[in-house]
């Protein structure tokens, strides 16, 4: 494994995310996707996470959210 590529998004999407989704029952998404779907700021997402309103899993420095828990904002 070429460790110089670990921080790149292409490595993350090709190597890490498939292992996470294959190991779990459902799809996990990163915070940027959750923020886009829910139309939240980074701070608002952190407050939801800390209050327990949005379940998450921490993997290294990344917070992952189960797609079934992410409900798009309808307003």
Image (tube, rainbow, N blue to C red):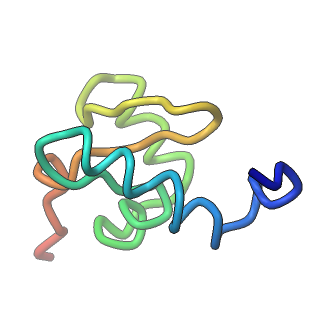
- Outermost residue to the front: 1
Above or below: residue 18 compared with residue 49:
below
Q: Is residue 2 left or right of residue 71?
A: right
Residue 3 at x, y percent in the picture: 83, 49
Work out which residue is located at the far top of the displayed protein and give it. Answer: 51
Q: Residue at coordinates 47% horizontally, 29% vertically from top-left? A: 58
Towards the viewer: 30 or 48: 30
* Front residue (pair 7, 1): 1
Classify 48 as above or below 41: above
Where does the C terminus fall, quadrant-wise? bottom left
x and y, in percent, of residue 42 in the image? 55, 53
Which residue is rendered at x = 41% and y = 67% of the image? 33
Q: How many marks?
A: 0
In the displayed structure, does residue 18 sit left or right of residue 8? left
Q: Residue at x 75, y 53 (%)?
A: 6
Q: Is residue 31 left or right of residue 73?
A: right
Front residue of 14 and 36: 14
Lateral position of residue 25 relative to residue 64, left or right: left
Which of the 4 image quarters holds residue 60?
Answer: top right
Q: Residue 70 in the image: state x and y as whole percent.
A: 19, 54
Q: Is residue 55 above or below residue 29?
A: above
């Amino acid at each position: 494994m070429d460790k110089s590529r670990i921080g790149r998004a292409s490595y993350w999407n090709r190597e890490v995310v498939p292992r996470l989704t294959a190991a779990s029952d459902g799809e996990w998404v990163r915070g940027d996707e959750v923020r886009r779907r829910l139309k939240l700021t980074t701070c608002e997402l952190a407050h939801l996470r800390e209050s327990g309103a949005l379940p998450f899993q921490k993997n290294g420095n990344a917070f992952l959210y189960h797609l079934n828990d992410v409900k798009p904002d309808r307003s």
